[in-house]
Amino acid sequence: MTESVLASSLWTTSFLATMLGAAVTAVLGAASACRAGEQRTNLALLSDAATWERLPVAKTGNGQPLPSWARMLAGELPRSTAAFL
């Protein structure tokens, strides 16, 4: 039983790390494209209050200051952002 819990925990951690890596790669790719003048994206950096309004209700920590990556992704990916937090 302990092995299945450990395997499940490792899979969840690996999955979340992969998803966060993909989101960061997408944001960084968009930023470099903007610098090169190829394409412009509209990923606004929301305020903490606006970000909390878009995220699902938190069990703990609601209303605390958020990292900039969360404030940028919450408008487009609110549930994924909440999962990473």
Image (cartoon, rainbow, N blue to C red):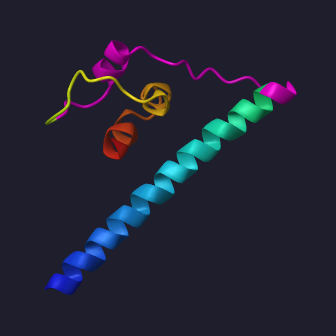
Toward which corner of the image does residue 33 lie, by quadrant? top right
Q: Residue at x 25, y 77 (%)?
A: 6
Frontmost residue, 4 versus 65: 65
Q: Is residue 19 above or below residue 78?
A: below
Instruction: Write the start and end of the magenta stretch as one range.
Output: 35-58
Q: Is residue 50 magenta?
A: yes
Principal SS element in the magenta part?
A: loop
For the C terminus, which image quadrant? top left
Expressed as whole percent of the image width and height from the top left, the position of residue 81 reads 39, 38
Toward which corner of the image does residue 83 lie, by quadrant? top left
Q: Is residue 76 left or right of residue 29?
A: left
Q: Residue at x 36, y 14 (%)?
A: 50
Expressed as whole percent of the image width and height from the top left, the position of residue 56 reads 25, 31
Q: Is residue 15 left or right of residue 31?
A: left
Q: Residue at x 48, y 49 (%)?
A: 20
For the N terminus, which image quadrant? bottom left
Frontmost residue, 76 versus 85: 85
